[in-house]
Amino acid sequence: MTWKLTAFAPKQTVQAALLAHDELEEWDPELVISGSEVAEDRPQDWVLEAWFPRRPGKAEKTALSGLFAGKAPKFTTDKVAETDWLILSQQGMEPIRAGCFHVRSPEHAACTEPGVTDLVIPASQAFGTGQHETTAGCLAMLTAMKRSGVIARNIADIGSGTGLLAFGALTLWPRALALATDIDPVCAPVMEDNCASNGVRVGGRAGELTLVIADGMDHPLIAARAPYDLLIANILAGPLVELAPDFAAHVPSGGNLVLAGLLETQEASVRRAYRLAGFRLAARLVNGDWSILWLRKRADRSAQ
């Protein structure tokens, strides 16, 4: 039997709680939360749901309330049948089209449209199923970059989660070296399973994907494989700002960055950090409330 806590609040309030959850270093992985619109005709009314493998007690309710900065809405507690949990875990997992990609869960049929790459990503504990605006936006941006003539020979996907963006990049640049990292150890088996499902070879040669568990850029293999002419980071605005100097040190002049995980309201501070680190804006797109940025490293004039 699974238990669920449910709270209704304005869109901005629920999104702030989800961001607060993402920034926590410690969180019980058995406690799964999500947020979504109540209905399509009520885009500002959102619901936050939290699923538990046991009846939630005071500690669980306190942890969840803490995501709302002292202004938590009222929660209702419901018992959910196990068969219903399987259905609930797939909610919002309808196939999507993003750029030249069709992303689906295993329960849906493959896309056979010519020129479209079909990727299979099941629901899991790792972030990056393609449903979130940031992930879909990155796939669209990568597609646009390829069509504009960008060549990538060495790729890093930092904070890869399920591995989806790394898969997309390898599809577009199949002869590249590619590396996918995440700070969460749970992502390692998730990425390995997804590699097998999508025919992505795991390894260290061109056209293969190297998997690394690391905090940001802090791993000897990440440094050894640098510089990266394409670095992708779909994480959060705060870590993106903090990582700007590290990314700059691992991307050569003319190299490309794709940044996501930042709200449109956070874009100015992120762009400022990367401008100071030596990057210029090549293109941007907005998907929902989220900005996706393509940045290019300026030439180091001091070395000329």
Image (spheres, rainbow, N blue to C red):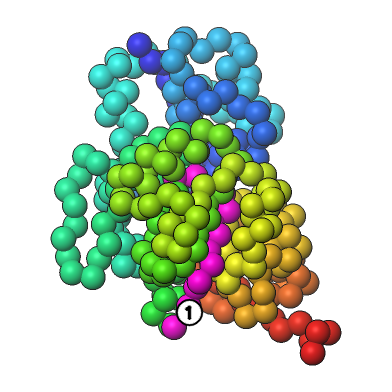
Pick out the residue farthest to the bottom: 304
Specify start and end residues of the magenta stretch as a single range. Answer: 149-162
Figure check: 216 above or below 291: above
Figure check: 194 above or below 62: below
In the rendered image, residue 75, in percent from the top left (x then y), is placed at 51, 22
Q: Is residue 96 visible?
A: yes
Which residue is located at x 64 percent, y 44 percent? 214
In the rendered image, residue 144, in percent from the top left (x then y), is placed at 41, 75
Which image quarter holds the N terminus? top left
Q: Amino acid at mark 1?
A: Val
Say which residue label 1 marks: 150
Which residue is located at x 51 percent, y 13 percent? 56
Which residue is located at x 68 percent, y 48 percent? 219
Q: Is residue 284 magenta?
A: no
Q: Is residue 42 visible?
A: no
Residue 15: name its quadrant: top right
